[in-house]
Image (tube, rainbow, N blue to C red):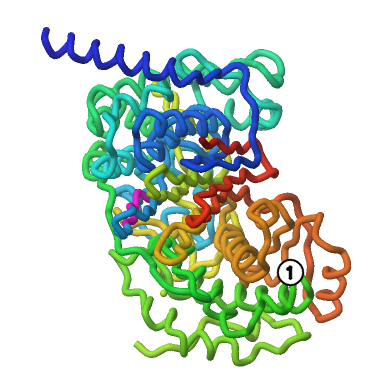
Amino acid sequence: MRQKLLLAFVYLLCSISFSNAQLNAFKYTQNKVVTCSNAAVVTAHPLASQAGISILKQGGNAVDAAIATQLALAVVFPNAGNVGGGGFLIANFNTGKNITIDYREKAPGKAYKDMYLDETGNPIKNLSLKKQLASGVPGTVAGLFASMKYAKLDFKILIEPAIQLAEKGFAITASQANDFNTYRDDFIKANKNPVAFVKMGEWKKGDVLIQKDLAATLKRIRDAGMKGFYKGKTAALIIKEMRSGNGIISLDDLKKYRATERKPVDFTYNGFRIITMPLPSSGGIILQQMLKMVEDRNIGSMGFQTKESVQLMIEAERRAYADRAFFLGDPDFVKVPVEKITDPVYLRQRMNDFIPGVAGSSIVTKEGMIRESEETTHVSIIDKDGNAVSVTTTLNDSYGSKTVVSGAGFILNNEMDDFSVKPGHPNMYGATGNAANAIAPYKRMLSSMTPAIVLKDNKPFLVVGTPGGTTIPTSVFQSIVNVIDFKLSAEDAVNLPKFHHQWLPDSVYMERTFSPVVMQQLKDMGYKIRTRGTIGRTEMILIDSKKRNIIAVADKRGDDGAEGY
């Protein structure tokens, strides 16, 4: 009885705390640029950013805010925010300590190398992308609780905004209404029972999305911690969902899942220090390779998005992604020659055949020679004490597998497609892989997520990251070079056009707003140019520690919102 009364009292305090934050879920604005002096949060949705800043104002630190924003995103940004997926967190604390937490999904225990191939050895279309069999074991909830050792506030306070947003609802944006209408048939096909994202008639801006089942799941996590997800009723609902289709996640898989702390990728670039994510994120290694390949070529003098600077960056991207395809995989399962493929001598050699003014070729350019392997969401945070957190989480495709766990209200990921289903066969993002990223029980699939923190004089200078599948590392690469080398403002570094090359296919992808003059100059060199819609949605915070000035920028490409005080 005493325990129930105590829980009720804590719940009341959480509710009061939440209401005091003045989060209006039915009438809110999107701030694209915020200048402040204490703390800032940038996420894919204004309500998640407001939830994060409210936690900071209540005395929480950057990790507290990161936990609260991730939970809020699971409610207000269901196409990528999640409890049914996974992610990576990196943090730089004012003590000088750097950490990374890996809560990438894992292959189920019953997974095997050729599970998505037909009898002739060819991939079965959509099997690794849709419905229950496409899902890896979710890691997000484990990651949140692994982060709690660095937090200050009680978890019940941090999860309360998400519970309220799920239970009472929030007004959807125009782009969300369009998404729900676009994916209506997919949700109906992937689910035997009604889901919150489908209603009679068309969704429109301002409609209220209420997610009662998700609220109940969040309450079980609030009351029982990790066990409220990986055991008990929620786990039983996940297994029931698996059995209703062709899924193979088991109770044992759920019970065994643990998040892992790993040593950060830590290197210097033109006097700045870059802290980013190690394997199974390919992004950190790719980012290091690309930056180090251009570091000694004075790219700043070439000018922003000139034919010279863009070509140099394209060729660095080509070589890094060739190495990704051949060498990279889960380091707990395969030996990856990280030190050798990030060695400065090796990276200089990789660029020996670069010819200014002449397009490279992915037929000629393969992985390096050594002796001896798009729908996400990002959160950037800085608190008043100078602690920085950069988090990227994912369901893989937009709305993941489209399968909602019946009775639990959350969407399952389709991360199994991030494995190399067959060597040399491209995944949904066109990325090819090798045996290093082959499917194996309990193995983590390779990821492109690249949360990053850039330090200047060992203090946070940039907190940056983006969604975008395989375009993530190149977008983070360009964002960092834009600020450090081209001296762009944070706003321009985020919002000006992006481009992307990933070795295969051998094409340069450019946003339609990219300079047509530079596009033609690259075509004249021999590059195949493909225009496309937006690339990524970068969330950046720039900190001038001397002036104690913080500029938080939310990408104009989406509903992203920045908050600060």
Quadrant for the N terminus in the image: top left
Q: Is residue 494 left or right of residue 150?
A: right
State the image coordinates of residue 413 (x, y, percent, origin top left).
46, 41
Q: Nearer the viewer, residue 481 or 329?
A: 481
Q: Nearer the viewer, residue 457 or 359?
A: 457
Residue 18, above or below 34 = above
Q: Is residue 121 visible?
A: yes
Task: Write down the quadrant of residue 160 in the picture.
Answer: top left
Which residue reaches farthest left? 2
Q: Is residue 563 left or right of residue 156?
A: right
Residue at 59%, 54% (x, y): give it.
428
Callout 1: 10 Å neighbours few (<14), some, many (20+)? Answer: some
The amino acid at mark 1 is Phe
Residue at 25%, 22% (x, y): give it.
223
State the image coordinates of residue 438 (x, y, percent, origin top left).
41, 64
In the rendered structure, which segment of residues is drawn in magenta? 99-104
Residue 541, above or below 154 = below
Which residue reaches farthest front? 547
Task: Write down the quadrant of residue 309 in the picture.
Answer: bottom right
Residue at 48%, 62% (x, y): give it.
454
Q: Is residue 438 visible?
A: no
Q: Nearer the viewer, residue 390 or 246?
A: 390
State the image coordinates of residue 280 (x, y, percent, origin top left).
39, 61
State the image coordinates of residue 476 (x, y, percent, origin top left).
57, 60
Q: Nearer the viewer, residue 502 or 345?
A: 345
Q: Main secondary structure of the magenta part?
A: strand
The residue that mark 1 highlights is 304
Q: Is residue 368 magenta?
A: no
Task: Write down the quadrant of residue 425 in the picture.
Answer: bottom right
Q: Is residue 434 left or right of residue 106?
A: right
Secondary structure of residue under mark 1: loop
